[in-house]
Every structure is written in structure tokens, then in C-alpha cells.
Amino acid sequence: MVVRIGLIGCGGISREHISAYLKLKGKAEVVATADLVEERAMNAARAVGAETHYTDYRDILKRPDIDAVDICLPHHLHAKVAVEAAEAGKHILCEKPIARSLEEADSMIDAARRYGVKLMIAENWRFLSQVNVAKQVVENGELGTVFLVKSDLISFPRDLVSSGWKLYAEKVGGGVSIDSGIHNVDMVRWVIGEVKTVTAFTNRLIRTEITGEDTGCILFKHVSDAISVLALTWAARFSADREYPLKIYGSEGAFAWSAWDGYVVVYKDGKRRVIETKPFSESFKAEIEHFVTCIESDRTPLTCGEEARRDLQLVLAAYESAKTGKAVKV
Ligand SMILES: NC(=O)c1ccc[n+]([C@@H]2O[C@H](COP(=O)([O-])OP(=O)(O)OC[C@H]3O[C@@H](n4cnc5c(N)ncnc54)[C@H](O)[C@@H]3O)[C@@H](O)[C@H]2O)c1
């Protein structure tokens, strides 16, 4: 079976999705694209080999020959378009974060359940081999008792202005924490385990063109009592050479991953073990392949609506903590 897909939103991230679809021929096929900007819809259709392109995504929802949609839209449109897609009987792959509020997230989860379609949030870090090695070494006990985790996202995205919508906290749902940081949130929760308390600080000292926060520091106390420190920024024009997105310290060893290198390192018994990993872009292929498999075999996606809702809840708790100055129990 080939899953027939309608790609909705043909901006930045759609290019990674398109590359993945090209590698998944025979399993998934994008048959139509849609973007408000016709040129983008047309270029995406050409790149992915789709038959048609539209400027109104509802033309995709009307087509009975389309099984699923891939939503690569701004955050304020996720819930609206996902609910309409569910009503039209389409399975849904939607980019992260699931939405801006728990109410929006619930409307998506409820609609998917009511209309019997899959809802998967495209949290590609779950499909990174780096992250899966980290999970393995934590779960097989190699690191002993994990007591401290550090996860950074140090960046200076240049598309905040050109995208338009990323300027506005109302459309994004906040700033760096809900947009980029939700990857780190999902990763540490997946690898280290559930979180019980959230504390955070945020600021916007540098990127005054946006209305959300450009910098955030989130602290998690996990159920295990391990502590995670997440340092997130969109304001770092200059960053150190190696900013590891994940470092895990345990009683018996440590783990370190540098996102942009093809390896991770496990430190144990005075030795350094290097484990080769797949390129970052492979995560998008693995993510879409998983979505297709879940449709074909009627399985719940790893990053289903409920999982992504929990990540959102933790980010919203961080915002609450930053506002009130208090730790938030979750
Ligand atoms: N997984 C990742 O690593 C990653 C990276 C970047 C972005 N994202 C996510 O992808 C999503 C899109 O982000 P982006 O960076 O591609 O944004 P973008 O602004 O580059 O692209 C969004 C596209 O949607 C189109 N659009 C807007 N309203 C529309 C409508 N009503 N109908 C049809 N098209 C419409 C815009 O014209 C634009 O081309 C977001 O959820 C974002 O968080 C994920």
C-alpha cells in the first residue's frame, strides 16, 4: 500500500519532509501540495513530484483519494487545520508543537479519536539515532543513577523576520521555548523519564523584533529526582564550537551528544567510547516512515497527540513559572 499524502504548508521545514518523501517512494507519495503562496506550493509539488498544487488547503481535504495530510503550518493554524482534516477522514502528521494551548491540543486529540484517524506530531528528535542511543544507555543502566542532565539549544535563526508569523508570540504560542525548546523538553522526558516540577526564567534582551522570549532556562525535577537544565536561545550570534544538546551524568558514567556531529560519546570506567550515529536529516525519514507504518498496521504513533500534549504542558508550566517566579508541579 502506498499512503497518499497532501502536504499543507510549503515553507522552511517542508523541504526536509520533501527530501524524506523522495526516499520513501513506494511507501508514501505526496500527490498534492498547498500553500497560500502559490509559487511555494508549485515549487514543492515539482520537487516532490506531486500531480497538483493548491493555494487553499481545503482542496486537499476534499479529495477522497488522499489518505493523510502532513501539516507544516505556523503554530496558530495547527489545531484548526488538524481538526478539519480529521473531520474529512484524513490521518494527520502535524509539525511540532502540537498547538499553542492545551485546549487547542485537546480539540485535535478529540477530533482524531472521534473520526478514527491517526494523529502524530512530527517530533523528529525522537527519531534521531543520537537520542535513541542515549535512551538505551540510560535504560540499560550503563550510566548508573542519573543525577544531572544538560540540554542546550543555542542558535540565531534568521527566518524569524522573513517568516512573518514567528515575530508574534500570539501566533507562535511564545518564543524559543515552545518553538525550538520543545524538542529538548520532549527529549529529556523521553530519555530520563517523567517530570514532576518545572522552574523557569525567560528574557528578551537581544531579539527585540519578536514579541516572545528569545532566551529561556528551564529546570526540571524528574520523578526519579534527577535534575535537567535546559538552556535555550535564539539570540546567540556567536556560539562555542561544541554545544552539546544532551549531556547526561550518572553515578557510573556520562553521555554526550553534539547534534551536528555524526557520533555520541559514552564515558565509563575511565574510557571514552565513540558511537557513530546517522545524519540529522535521517530523522525526518524515520519519522514519516513511522507515521506510514502506524497507518498501515493501525498502531498508535510514538509521538501521538497525548505525548505531544504533555510536552506542551511542560512548556506552559515553564511559562507560568517564569511569570510567577514559582516552581510549578506538573
Ligand atoms: N522539526 C523541526 O526541526 C522544525 C524546524 C522548523 C520548523 N518546524 C515546524 O514546522 C512548522 C512550520 O514552520 P516553518 O519554519 O516551515 O514555517 P514557514 O513560515 O517557513 O512555512 C510555513 C508555510 O505555511 C504557509 N501558510 C501559512 N498560512 C497558510 C494557510 N492558511 N494555508 C496554506 N499555507 C499557509 C506559509 O505561506 C509558509 O510557506 C512549525 O510548526 C514549526 O515549528 C519544525
Image: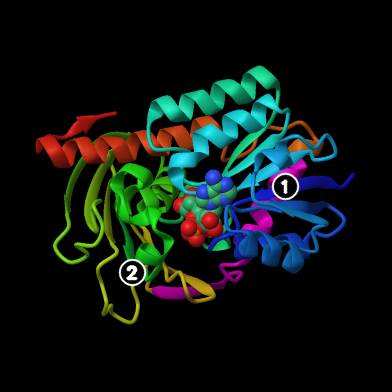
Question: Quadrant of the rendered structure where residue 303 is?
Answer: top right
Amino acid type of the residue tagged 1 in the rendering: Gly
The percent coordinates of residue 179 (x first, y second) are 38, 51
Sequence order check, earlier mark of 1 and 2: 1
Label 1: how many residues lie within 10 Å, few (<14), some (14-19) or many (20+)?
A: many
211 and 245: which is toward the camera: 211
Magenta span includes 292 = yes
The reply, left or right, for residue 258 in relation to residue 202 is right
The percent coordinates of residue 151 (x first, y second) are 33, 58
In this view, the mark in front (1 or 2): 1
The reply, left or right, for residue 93 in relation to residue 252 is right
Tell whether label 2 touches label 1 (CB within 8 Å). Answer: no
Report the residue at 46% width, 30% height from top. 105
112 and 295: which is toward the camera: 112
- What residue is shown with label 1? 6
The reply, left or right, for residue 132 in relation to residue 145 is right
Residue 276's disc number: none
Report the residue at 83% width, 34% height from top. 64
Mark 1–mark 2 distance (CA, rounded to whole Å): 31 Å
Element at label 1: strand
Regarding residue 229, the answer to whether it shows in the image is: yes
Element at label 2: loop
Indicate whether 79 appears above or below 110.
Answer: below
241 and 26: which is toward the camera: 26
State the extent of the magenta-drawn residues as a range: 271-293
Label 2: how many residues lie within 10 Å, few (<14), some (14-19) or many (20+)?
A: some
Residue reaching furthest to the left = 325
Report the residue at 59% width, 22% height from top. 111
Residue reaching furthest to the top = 114
- What residue is shown with label 2? 155
